[in-house]
Amino acid sequence: MDEITKVLRREFDAEEGSFLLRLRGDLEWDRAAFARLERAMRVACERSQSDEKLDRWVVEGFYEVVTWVPSWTSHPNFPKPAPDACFEDCVERIGDLANWFFRGWHDYSEGCVWNDL
């Protein structure tokens, strides 16, 4: 199992230190954990573009992230990060990645880089 697959497993299973666990358990938007999740999801999108079949656990993970994170963080009592944290952009990015994963193509230009979150 390669490193990206391991990261996706840990994140989608909401294991200790994962973005999803920090978000739900600690009510904290962990930028480093989000960046790790975003990178792994992006690489999964890149790798899966030509796949005829997708692993069910990955599909379910993408679906859960794209439906659960925006819902959970939109609650008025969720402590939003500081405005400079690009919170809304990150939530939108999750949706963009899910669209890319499920459709097999993305809307971004080749110059778009998300590595500096």
Image (tube, helix red, strand yellow):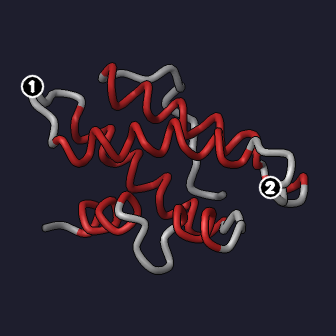
Which amino acid, mark 1?
Answer: Glu
| Element on which disc 2 rests | loop
- Residue at the spot 54% in from the left edge and 43% down from the top edge: 68
The percent position of residue 43, horizontal first and vertical second, equals: 34, 48
| Picture residue at 10% right of the left edge, 30% below the top | 53
Q: CA distance from mark 1 to mark 2?
A: 39 Å
Considering depth in this image, is 65 or 48 the residue closer to the camera? Answer: 65
**Drawn side of residue 75 relative to residue 116, left or right:** right
Q: Nearer the viewer, mark 1 or mark 2?
A: 2
Where 7 falls versus 63 (above or below)? below
Q: Is residue 63 left or right of residue 47?
A: right
Residue closest to the eye, 9 or 45: 9
Which amino acid, mark 2? Phe
Q: Residue furthest left?
A: 52
CB of mark 1 within 8 Å of CB of mark 2? no
Count of labels in the image: 2
Residue marked by disc 1: 52
Locate residue 54: give its quadrant. Answer: top left
Q: Residue at x 41, y 45 (%)?
A: 42
Residue at x 26%, y 46% (from the top left corner): 58
Say whether residue 76 is left or right of residue 11: right
Mark carried by residue 78: 2
